[in-house]
Amino acid sequence: MIIVCFVSGSGTNYERIVERDPAHRYVVFTNRPDCEGVQKARANGHVTIELSHLPYLQNAREKHGLGSVPRNCPERLQYEQEVWRLIEDTIGVAPDLICLAGYDQWFTDWTVDRYYPWILNVHPGDTTRGYAGLYWIPTAKAILAGDREIRSTLFIVDKGEDTGPVLAQSRPLQIVPTLEALDSEGASDLVGSYDRVVDYAAGQGITSYLAFEASADAEHKAAMKVVCKSLQDALKRAGDWTVYPFAVHDLIARGRVQVVDRAVYVDGLLMPDHGYRMDLEPPG
């Protein structure tokens, strides 16, 4: 397959995908020239393409504000069309698969219409349970909902925010045992911080992140942040770095996946909303 990976930073998801099977033809695009991910791609001998988004979005940022540039504004569309011109001129054809591997820009509807359903992204949380958000917030939502485990979700990019149909989910990461293991490695008292947060939320009848943010004091917010950041780092390794290469190489590359509109089939079987779960993978 021709696999185009989009990176903006360290490129660790790209690394894990390539490690699983280096035999495919990989192309790496970045909007942040000379980022660590591109340096890794060069070291691997992979084609790299660089085009900064900053000159294209400067006017839109001045107009709408930093961090508020609309997903489908003309400036973003112009940038994206130039990106794809560069990529397709370089590889000579449309890619077989597009992997967002730590890419910090939205794809416009134009790109989704052009390449759906072969754009993948990974999210450090269970999107089917509404655990959206950046950084460690999905884990906070899971804790406040009373979950005892967290998962990474590999989904097909659509026109929403982490709303695409789910292809696969990682094996679950147990929250308390993970915190206990981190504490034993010399971390802070993560289990104690977790217990304080859970007890506070239960005592206040809080089950949502919005309610927690609105009512919690600085001490409980700080405890939540340190716990969730630690869990998020662990989930990246145990979840993101396993489900992404699994979906690319064990499912898609083997021809096991079909997508009809928003329905996902693996081995001819219609998948439930949570997609193919790695913990249900038969041995071997």
Image (cartoon, rainbow, N blue to C red):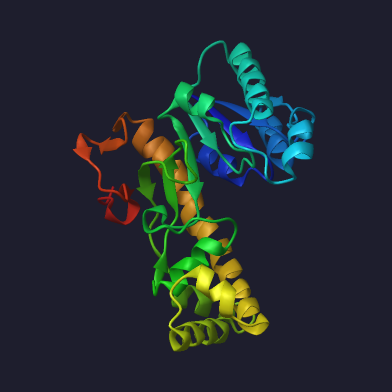
User: Which residue is pictured at 40% across the width and 54% down the height?
Assistant: 170
Quarter residue 73 falls in: top right
Relative depth, front residue between 263 and 237: 263
In this view, 127 is above or below 223: above
In this view, 190 is above or below 141: below
Horizontal placement of 73 versus 94: left or right? right
In this view, 152 is above or below 64: below
Relative depth, front residue between 79 and 44: 79
Quarter residue 48 falls in: top right
In this view, 234 is above or below 72: below
Where is residue 113? Give x, y as percent.
46, 24
Horizontal placement of 104 versus 241: left or right? right
Relative depth, front residue between 251 and 84: 84
Mark yes or no: residue 240 visible: yes
Mark yes or no: residue 96 visible: no
Where is residue 189? Give x, y as percent.
60, 84
Quarter residue 203 falls in: bottom left
User: Which residue is pictured at 70% across the width and 30% down the height?
Assistant: 42
